[in-house]
Image: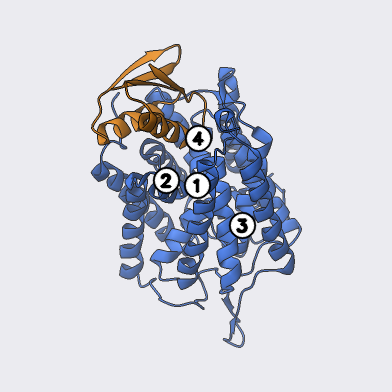
Amino acid sequence: MNFNLSDSKKKLALAGVVCGLVAAALAYFGNPANMAICIACFVRDTAGALGMHQADTVQYARPEIIGIVLGAFAISAATKEYRSTAGSSPMIRFVLGMVIMIGSLVFLGCPLRMVIRMSAGDLNAWVALIGFILGVATGAFALKKGFSLGRAHETQKSSGVVLPAIMVGILLLALCTTLLKSSEAGPGSMHAPIIISLIGGLIFGAFAQKSRMCFAGSIRDVILMKNFDLLTVIVGLFVVMLIYNIATGNFVLGFDTPGIIAHSEHLWNILGMYAVGFAAVLAGGCPLRQLVLAGQGSSDSAVTVLGLFFGAALCHNLGLASSGTALNAETGDVVAGAATPAGKVAVIICIIVCFIIAFTNKRESAK
Amino acid sequence: MKEVDARGLSCPEPLMLTAEALKNADGPVKVLVSEPHQKMNVEKYAKDHGKKAVSTEKDGCFEVVIE
């Protein structure tokens, strides 16, 4: 089966457009405004559904996350790209997963949501993009200096199936039992019908796998290789979401825009996404790419995904996640969202950890 | 022939090592990678730089010879 989306810029842009349409459809059918298919938000919600944290407004087993992993799994198996591998510094990857989630929840969104927020006119996301680019550039600099997490090796076939199987398990628990927590108010209570979310996730996962869609990789490749291939996918997605937001009246240019779930503390938006960009380059991909790689058999990426879950639990159990700007229902006043003191300290620690990881792990030939 | 063993390495290391080897080599360069998309990236890089790439699959990994 020849189904290759990464051999021409047109196909890559098409993949971005398809993923943009999926995101727009999910927003249309009930997902929270401008989260659409945010990986960090939805992993956090799923962690909440499993009871890993107790923030009762962000608990819901998101079928999109399950769908992305299973979509990538199915398409990679069908096109002979599935390989069960492991062994490239898994615990460092776990820590990088934590860093990515903490940085994301201080900014309030993963790189995918940053792009979706940018397409809705949220200037805070454009400010955060500066931090993200600087973070990716720092990671790229470390790569140039010889950074590597070492080689992965082929492992038991069954190892690569574990995360997809866990995702099927979570889906079955969500469909057949009342064991999982589900928010009655807040973002966790807003969702498209399960079947639409699941199909959307499957399509998104399959196209992301075939196009190698990666938000960190796109900027990294421009910096390191002057290669704009992966950026083409992101631009495709951005354009579709921009058209959707303008057409539905969701495009509001500004900083304090209640309803978007964002805050305007510029320094912490920049530093949060700096940590995310830096850690994502060190881990070999953004949160979306980690889910996709885990689906195609990488146990190392599966461990990174577990790090995302663990980080999400820490964020809400220890109050690291920022609050979003909101309207006070009674007075009609705009209440500014903010990063928390603990969140700020956590982001600083995350950045220091990234620097330590980046400059203490070298390729054999670069030592 | 100069050989680059990039098996099991995360992106973009295989491409960075290939670029470095091509810069320093006079003759052909042999690149070993594990993942199909890495094979494609290496082939594309070679083509973009006016070189010919021939790939074969061996023992679950790919051998790309660039000249």
What is the distance, in whole Å, between disc 1 and disc 3 at their CAs? 18 Å
Instruction: Choose the circle earlier in sequence order: 1 or 4.
Output: 1
Find disc 1 in the rendering and name its residue.
Answer: A140
How would you rate the neighbour count of disc 3 (Cα within 10 Å): few for under 14, some for 14-19, many for 20 or more?
A: many
Residue at label 4? A293
Badge 4: chain ID: A
Q: Nearer the viewer, residue A237 or A342?
A: A342
- Residue A285: horizontal and vertical position, in percent? 50, 43
* Same chain letter for marks 1 and 3: yes
Mark 1 vs 2, N-terminal side: 1
- Is A213 placed above or below A110 here? above
Q: Amino acid at mark 1?
A: Ala
Compare marks 1 and 3 and give the one earlier in the sequence: 3
Say if residue B22 shows up in the picture: yes
Vertical arrangement, residue A240 with respect to residue A10, above or below:
below
| Protein chain holding label 3 | A
Q: Nearer the viewer, residue A226 or B55?
A: A226
Residue type, mark 3 in image: Gly
In front: label 1 or label 4:
1
> Badge 1 sits on which subunit?
A
Q: Residues within 10 Å of mark 4 (few under 14, many from 20)?
A: many
Give the number of the mark in front: 4 or 3: 3
Of pointers 4 and 3, the one earlier in the residue sequence: 3
Looking at the rendered image, the quarter that the N terminus of chain A falls into is top left
Q: Can residue A180 be seen here?
A: no
The colour assigned to chain B within the rendered structure: orange
